[in-house]
Image: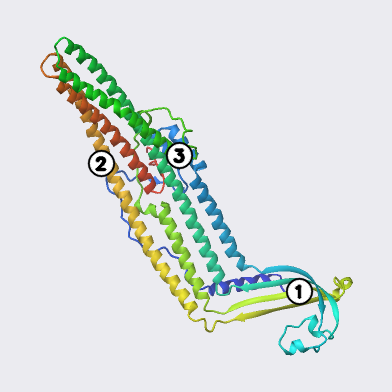
């Protein structure tokens, strides 16, 4: 016989087994996707193919402190660590599901002292349907020892693919867990970024409030001196005192809000509250407003963890249908036992003590009370539910990205107008002060102009932080960062 004969036989057997696998191979469902995003932004860039949490994307904000906080959060955040532990659990489940494809062997050893009843007959046990054993054939009234060492074999031949479909489902479910872990990481990056931007916004508001308080206190001193010589009224003094107290009252509240936001950032990065010391830095001094290139909408199907997660569950559900179908077919199992058995310990390990039994068994389901049919109906129903969930998740993803693209673009235009408003308000303050010194207006006009500057400057910081927050949301909605446009070499 040729040496290749066993190999050919095993190959043919494997092909026959695979041909009998129940269920269909998963195919991604057809979904409607837009041809392109809104024309609000460029589309010549592509999203990065890496499915990990892209902390390097944050370097576009040109802030090493922010990048360091994100990297620390990814390493020390407890939600991320829990998600990683779940991945290990899922991989163990795959190993457990795969184990059914291989033979199961058990080694056992025992010693028994047997006393046969005197009021019985040899061979009576066989007549009553008992399994053959030493006590059945022993003479009534005898007592003896029995030393036994055996190896048990059980191997279910996965002819209909029930075990393989179970393994496929377990692998897909583990993929879903991995995508959930990636979603946790992306959410963490988003939360850290938003918290950091909020802290820097409060820093700038504190800076504005401090400068405003200094200006109003200086104005108060000037008004008091002018009132003392009759050049200003007591009403001007009181109005200035009100504004000075108003500016002073903002500082402790802004300080409180900053401390609370710092505690949130500390927990996100795996630190105890009060252990992170961030020096005050105004938002506009530490954060750049990057441009946002956007790739093709269809790339979301390959990137967003929620889409990939629900698709993985869809793959698992499709495999469960094949697994449910396999229960309608016979189960072929090979069982065996072999070992050494002796009534004399001295002869236990001799060749005459060897015994074995081996053979196939087939179990054909005849009547299960509708269990198998119900299992199949349940699996098919779950697949339809997950299919609709998959399509809904895709629509929701496209809507989120489209909304954020519109918002980021609108915030950019709003920033331009708000900067113009602030410049005009500052010029109005200068003119009001000149006119007041010349006696052309009362001090109320100066105070109103100063109040307008404070509101315009505060609103500008709020819009800048809101745009950054929406960019963070877009980063999350796109499933991670993106690659810059590829430069075209000059011809």
Q: Quadrant of residue 278?
A: top left
Q: Which residue in the protein does label 1 denote?
A: 338
Which is more toward the observer, 190 or 296? Answer: 190
Q: CA distance from mark 2 to mark 1?
A: 79 Å
In this rendering, would 437 be left or right of 109?
left
Vertical side of 328 occupied by 402: above or below: above
The residue wearing badge 3 is 56
The tag earlier along the polypeptide, 2 or 3, is 3
Q: Which mark is residue 410?
A: 2
Q: In the picture, which quadrant includes the C terminus?
A: top left
Q: Secondary structure at mark 1?
A: strand
Sequence-wise first label, 2 or 1: 1
Return the x and y of residue 435 as percentages of the image width and height.
13, 17
Nearest-to-viewer mark from 2 and 1: 1
Q: Badges 2 and 3: C-beta atoms under 8 Å apart?
A: no
Q: Is residue 130 visible?
A: yes
Quadrant placement of the N terminus? bottom right
Residue 192 coordinates in the image, percent (x, y): 42, 40
10 Å neighbourhood of mark 2: few (<14), some, or many (≥20)? few
* Up/down of 175 relative to 16, above or below: above
Could you tell me how far apart the alpha carbons at marks 2 and 3 are, in whole angstroms? 26 Å
Residue that lies at the very extreme toward the right in this rendered image: 346
Asked if residue 452 lies left or right of residue 8, the reply is left
Residue 54 position, x and y percent, is 45, 43
């Amino acid at each position: 016989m040729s040496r290749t004969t066993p190999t050919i036989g095993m190959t043919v057997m494997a092909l026959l087994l695979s041909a009998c696998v129940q269920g269909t191979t998963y195919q991604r469902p057809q979904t409607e996707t837009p041809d392109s995003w809104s024309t609000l932004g460029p589309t010549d860039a592509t999203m990065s193919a890496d499915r990990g949490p892209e902390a390097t994307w944050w370097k576009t904000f040109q802030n090493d402190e922010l990048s360091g906080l994100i990297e620390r959060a990814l390493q020390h955040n407890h939600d991320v660590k829990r998600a990683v532990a779940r991945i290990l659990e899922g991989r163990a489940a795959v190993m457990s599901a795969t184990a059914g494809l291989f033979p199961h062997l058990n080694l056992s050893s025992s010693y028994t002292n047997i006393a046969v009843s005197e009021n019985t007959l040899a061979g009576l046990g066989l007549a009553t349907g008992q399994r053959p054993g030493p006590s059945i054939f022993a003479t009534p009234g005898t007592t003896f020892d029995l030393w036994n060492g055996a190896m048990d074999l059980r191997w279910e031949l996965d002819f209909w693919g029930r075990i393989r479909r179970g393994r496929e489902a377990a692998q897909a479910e583990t993929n879903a867990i991995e995508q959930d872990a990636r979603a946790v990481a992306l959410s963490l990056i988003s939360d850290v970024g938003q918290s950091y931007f909020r802290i820097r916004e409060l820093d700038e508001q504190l800076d504005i409030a401090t400068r405003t308080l200094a200006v109003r206190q200086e104005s108060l001193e000037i008004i008091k001196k002018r009132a003392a010589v009759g050049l200003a009224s007591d009403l001007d003094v009181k109005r200035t005192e009100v504004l000075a107290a108003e500016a002073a009252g903002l500082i402790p509240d802004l300080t409180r809000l900053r401390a609370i936001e710092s505690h949130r950032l500390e927990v996100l990065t795996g630190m105890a509250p009060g252990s992170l010391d961030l020096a005050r830095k105004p938002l506009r001094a530490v954060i750049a407003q990057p441009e946002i290139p956007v790739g093709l909408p269809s790339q979301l199907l390959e990137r967003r963890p929620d889409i990939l997660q629900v698709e993985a569950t869809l793959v698992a559900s499709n495999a469960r249908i094949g697994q449910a179908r396999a229960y309608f077919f016979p189960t072929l199992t090979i069982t065996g036992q072999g070992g050494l058995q002796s009534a004399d310990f001295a002869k236990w390990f001799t060749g005459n003590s060897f015994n074995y039994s081996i053979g196939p068994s087939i179990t054909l389901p005849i009547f299960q009370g509708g269990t198998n049919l119900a299992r199949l109906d349940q699996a098919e129903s779950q697949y339809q539910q997950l299919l609709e969930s998959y399509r809904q998740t895709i629509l929701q993803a496209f809507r989120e990205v489209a909304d954020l693209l519109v918002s980021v673009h609108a915030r950019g235009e709003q920033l331009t107008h708000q900067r113009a408003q602030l410049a005009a308000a500052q010029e109005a303050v200068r003119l009001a002060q000149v006119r007041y010194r010349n006696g052309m207006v009362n001090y109320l006009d100066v105070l109103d102009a100063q109040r307008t500057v404070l509101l315009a400057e505060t609103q500008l910081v709020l819009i800048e932080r809101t745009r950054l927050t929406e960019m963070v949301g877009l980063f999350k909605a796109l499933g991670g960062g993106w690659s810059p446009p590829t430069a075209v070499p000059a011809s």
